[in-house]
Amino acid sequence: MTPDLDESWSIRGVEIPTRLVLAPMAGVSVQAFRRQGRRYGAGLVCSEMVSVAGIQHRNERTLGYLRVAADEHPLAIQIFGSDPPAMAEAARMVEAAGADLVDINFGCPVKKVTKTGAGASLLDDPERAVRIVESVATATPLPVSVKMRRGTENGSRACLEVGPRLVEAGAASLTLHPRSARQMYTGTADHSLTAELVSLVDVPVVASGDVDSRARAQAVLATTGAEAVMVGRAAQGNPWALREIMGEPGEPTREEVVAELLLFMRETVRELGPERATGFLKKFYGWYLGRGRFPKPFKQELVMLPTLEAVETRLLAAAPGAREELERLEADLGPVDEVLLDSLPISLYGGG
Ligand SMILES: Cc1cc2nc3c(=O)[nH]c(=O)nc-3n(C[C@H](O)[C@H](O)[C@H](O)COP(=O)(O)O)c2cc1C
């Protein structure tokens, strides 16, 4: 039977309206990205990984990652670190920020993270991984989910050993990206491991890795028994991939592409402030305008422009009809939603 991506499911009482989850991606998963993901069919969205050390030191930029918009629920905020009590404190902050789930990162393969004993390296230290999940699950009533890789080394099956122990420790859901940390993003995700993990635990498992189409999403759900699929790279500058996965195929018009990019730019400026947004947005031009939608030199031209206003003007000149489309999108979104900051101990206004 073909799995129904439209069906709802839940993680310990948190209802998730579709079986499509938007992946956490550092340097990508800002609020604008998550809200867009929700609009295009993702039932659950996730922040990028947030440093527990940064939270402990009340680093303003780190705390900015905890800003939650009213229309992005259900939302997971992902934390990374290696010290169980610090992880517990961070989980309480995540709860105060208004997230629906606390997600723990046991998958990051980047040296800067693994050398501190965090991320994927915790798959080599199951005792500590268990203590982290226990202390986070004790610290907050929110459901705790864990995202992990298959292990650190190629061919590793550590996820199958560690996963069930994390569930025993209190994890209410597991997400598996079945590549090794060593692989980074090379090779392919081996979802036969996802199927094995599903058979070992009695909590929902989310399958992450190489899902970029409806056909692939359905195949992964059918062959693994996972509760949901997670989509990352395919959705970068391309919410239409989410729409296609949800059953509405069709390439966007140039006007639609430009309107979504302009909305994304405006939202990002509101979130990060114009200075940070200018650099942050550069990689998105290629992601939105590539895929044969606009000629290559156009992206180069945008990257060279000195201000975001100049980029906006140039984009509208290339697709004048986008102005109307943008107005429609902004009207549908309504006024800028409340950010739930009241319960956080310091002010996060000012771009974070
Ligand atoms: C730019 C980038 C940043 C990422 N950052 C995170 C992160 O912060 N936390 C995390 O758990 N995974 C992170 N990932 C991994 C993705 O969530 C996902 O598991 C992986 O990209 C495989 O899925 P995909 O093939 O759909 O991209 C990142 C991936 C990319 C490409």
Image (cartoon, rainbow, N blue to C red):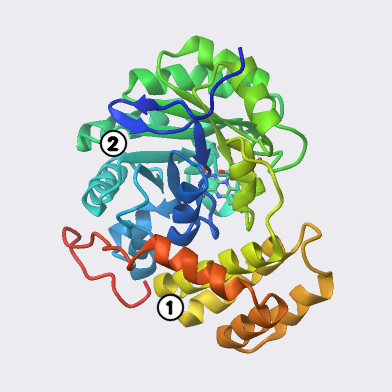
Residue 91 located left or right of residue 207? left
Q: Dot 2, crowdedness within 10 Å: few (<14), some or many (≥20)?
A: many
Local secondary structure at mark 2: helix
Residue 256 located left or right of residue 17? right
Q: Position of residue 220 (x, y in %)?
A: 64, 24
Image quadrant of ligand 1 equals top right
Location of residue 154 (image quadrant): top right
Q: Which mark is residue 273?
A: 1
Residue drawn 33% across and 62% down?
63
Residue 77 seen in render:
yes
Q: Position of residue 46 (x, y in %)?
A: 44, 46
Q: Of residues 124 and 236, which is closer to you in this image?
A: 236
Q: What is the quadrant of the N terminus in the image?
A: top right
Residue 209 lies, with reference to residue 220, above or below; the image says: below
- Residue type at mark 2 is Val
Q: Position of residue 337 (x, y in %)?
A: 30, 63
Q: Which mark is residue 136?
A: 2
Q: What is the quadrant of the C terminus in the image?
A: bottom left
